[in-house]
């Protein structure tokens, strides 16, 4: 297990390094600079601003210095907002995290049971209904589901607001909007995983021995059948946190999405790099966690990966 | 005496493609999807030409209900919704096609080189793909789009001044192309992996050995004998990635980072429609329906093609 972990950890560091490099040079290649859209700023003030943020130095030198700063956890200061990037992230991340968790609960709560039941009742009407639902979840984007929920549900129920982020109940509609697509993928994934396990010999043996169906599902099939879904959960959670721009905009959730979009529009490369690196870090950690859980659940993965890592 | 009807399909022998076609034909959902897609393309690219200008405003006729003159009614600027949906569909479908073509080209070339090269080069190329996989896709596409758009501004200035192209056309062109390229340039990863696996399988077959023993060059073998054999699988996965790309364009446009006026796409129409959903739900629902039906059809066709070409990989 340990060589497996160190190998994955090392890979994660390489990913973060590559992400930093790509993002840095893309940000440098973007036209304009953080100060270009400010009105009535004289050239000498801009010059001083550039000096203050180190933008007057050669690009490679900037790259080296910023990389070193990031390695020590120094995310720098956003020239546009005039605040430390980490402070901006710390202020907006909780909302994104809570929304992402809500979305995950919706996705797991709907997707996995639906996939299991579909697999058990294969080709029955429950299966067809569930898979039709999954297709809808995949093909109807969040920015259609969101407005439909707002006008169809929130306008009719007093305790739900169309948008806003003040009371705990406000999380309900955004979480549903965010989680539905992932629920659909999970349902399909769980169904095919369960079907594969249910067709294997050891399940047939158990049936032949007269084990009741419920017990076969719970004791024998779930562990293997849920593997693909578990492997998917790590990246999915990272996606739910980092990919919720649209839902955050729709429901006016004060999360990180707005900062990313604005940073790209404002050419605020400091904030942009900070937000991207933070997302990247989350994704790496989530993938690592998914790998570990998968290895714990599946002895075959554990053994082969350990052997490969030696 | 009656003969059982002869099944003449056997006489032609069963090539892989023919076999797959016979299986696909039995999948009613996939066939229906194909018909829907052909109809959708015909509507957006041919029939649309007979409809009025999608940007023609008529402020005295705002929010008109569906009528003989405007089948789907008009929007907040009095523009005909049907023609906006059809012209918007052009951009959405083009994103799917062009971005897919870009992704397909990069993915197949990269994947087949990786699969055909020495183990060391292969390892390096696949690690690079692993790294790119772990990077937030949306974030990179947005960045890349902004960068390409910057370059595009320089190019489009030359197009209008030096080459004398129509400014309106160049403006539209310069707005759409960066998005196509950015999505395609980052969407090839899965295709590269699949192609690599295929190439590794095919390079060990006898016909490749025969080509080697005939003294053909490596590149010639790769491009003439191996890559054509990977195309079937690649096309299946293309059908399955296309809806993702279309969705992507819509999301970016929805965020205000994609297509801009005077261009429009289904994403833009949905965004505009969402503003008036309480009073005029049709402005949201109609574009959303066109959008979702296309995505449904692409997904069902992709699933059907996969089952037909590779019965073992079937989901059930």
Image (spheres, rainbow, N blue to C red):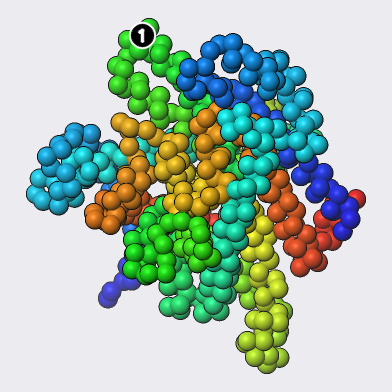
In the image as oriented, which residue stretches furthest toward the top?
B162
**A21 or B212: nearer the viewer:** A21
Q: Which residue is drawn at 76% across and 44% down?
A: A12
| Residue bearing the label numbered 1 | B161
**A172 or B85: nearer the viewer:** A172
Residue B118 location (% of width, % of height): 77, 34
In the image as oriented, which residue stretches furthest toward the bottom?
A210
Task: Tell me, yes or no, if residue A4 can be seen here.
Answer: yes
Q: Which residue is drawn at 63% across and 19% down?
A: A49
Residue A67 location (% of width, % of height): 76, 30
Q: In which quarter of the image is the C terminus of chain B?
A: bottom right
Residue A140, by quadrant, is: bottom left
Q: Residue at x 57, y 63 (%)?
A: A102
Vertically, is B292 above or below B165?
below
Residue A86 location (% of width, % of height): 68, 41
Disc 1: which chain? B
Q: Is residue A64 left or right of residue A100?
A: right
Residue B89, by quadrant, is: top left
Q: Quadrant of the N terminus of chain B?
A: bottom left
Q: Residue at x 62, y 23 (%)?
A: A28
In the image as oriented, which residue stretches furthest toward the left?
B68
Count the numbered circles shown.
1
Q: What element carries label 1?
A: helix
């Amino acid at each position: 297990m340990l060589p497996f972990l160190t190998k994955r950890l090392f890979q994660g560091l390489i990913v973060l390094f590559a992400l930093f490099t790509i993002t840095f040079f893309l940000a440098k290649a973007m036209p304009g600079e953080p100060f270009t859209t400010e009105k009535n700023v004289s050239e000498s003030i801009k010059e001083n601003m550039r000096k203050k943020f180190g933008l007057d130095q050669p690009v490679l030198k900037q790259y080296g210095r910023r990389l070193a700063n990031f390695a020590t956890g120094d995310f720098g200061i956003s020239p546009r907002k005039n605040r430390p990037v980490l402070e901006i992230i710390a202020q907006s991340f909780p909302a994104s995290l809570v929304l992402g968790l809500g979305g995950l609960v919706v996705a797991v709560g709907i997707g996995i049971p639906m996939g299991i039941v579909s697999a058990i009742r294969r080709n029955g009407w429950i299966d067809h209904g569930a898979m039709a639902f999954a297709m809808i979840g995949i093909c109807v984007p969040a920015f259609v589901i969101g407005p439909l929920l707002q006008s169809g549900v929130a306008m009719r129920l007093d305790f739900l607001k169309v948008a806003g982020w003040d009371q705990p109940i406000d999380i309900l509609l955004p979480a549903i909007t965010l989680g539905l697509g992932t629920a659909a993928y999970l349902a399909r994934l769980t169904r095919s995983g369960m079907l594969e396990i249910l067709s294997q010999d050891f399940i047939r043996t158990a049936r032949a021995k007269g084990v009741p169906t419920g017990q076969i599902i719970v004791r024998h099939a779930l562990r293997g059948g849920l593997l693909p879904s578990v492997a998917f959960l790590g990246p999915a959670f990272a996606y739910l946190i980092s990919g919720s721009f649209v839902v955050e905009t729709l429901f006016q959730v004060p999360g990180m999405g707005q900062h990313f979009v604005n940073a790209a529009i404002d050419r605020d490369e400091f904030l942009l790099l900070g937000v991207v690196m933070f997302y990247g870090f989350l994704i790496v950690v989530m993938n690592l966690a998914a790998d570990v859980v998968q290895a714990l659940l599946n002895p075959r993965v554990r053994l082969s990966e350990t052997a490969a890592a030696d | 005496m009656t003969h059982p009807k002869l099944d003449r399909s056997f006489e032609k022998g069963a090539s892989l493609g023919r076999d797959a076609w016979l299986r696909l034909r039995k999948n009613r959902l996939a066939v229906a999807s194909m018909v829907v897609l052909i109809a959708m393309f015909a509507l957006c690219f041919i029939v649309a030409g007979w409809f009025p200008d999608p940007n023609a405003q008529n402020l005295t006729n705002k929010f008109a209900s569906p009528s003989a003159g405007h089948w789907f009614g008009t929007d907040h600027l009095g523009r005909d919704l049907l023609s906006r949906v059809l012209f918007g569909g052009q951009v959405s479908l083009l994103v799917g096609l062009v971005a897919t073509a870009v992704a397909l080209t990069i993915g197949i070339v990269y994947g087949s080189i990786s699969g055909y090269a020495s183990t060391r080069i292969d390892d390096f190329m696949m690690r690079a793909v692993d790294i790119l996989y772990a990077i937030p896709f949306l974030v990179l596409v947005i960045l890349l789009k902004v960068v390409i758009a910057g370059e595009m501004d320089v190019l489009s200035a030359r197009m209008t001044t030096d080459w004398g192209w129509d400014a309106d056309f160049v403006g539209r062109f310069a707005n759409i192309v960066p998005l196509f390229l950015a999505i395609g340039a980052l969407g090839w990863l899965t295709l590269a992996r699949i192609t690599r696996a295929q190439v590794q399988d095919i390079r060990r077959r006898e016909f490749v050995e025969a080509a080697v023993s005939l003294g053909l060059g490596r590149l010639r073998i790769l491009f003439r004998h191996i890559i054509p054999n990977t195309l079937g699988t690649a096309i299946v996965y293309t059908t399955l990635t296309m809806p993702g790309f279309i969705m992507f364009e819509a999301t970016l446009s929805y965020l205000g980072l994609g297509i801009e006026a005077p261009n429009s796409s289904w994403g833009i129409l949905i965004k505009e429609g969402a503003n008036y959903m309480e009073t005029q739900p049709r402005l949201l629902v109609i574009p959303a329906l066109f959008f979702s039906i296309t995505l449904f059809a692409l997904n069902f066709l992709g699933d059907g093609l996969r089952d037909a070409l590779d019965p073992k990989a079937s989901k059930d």
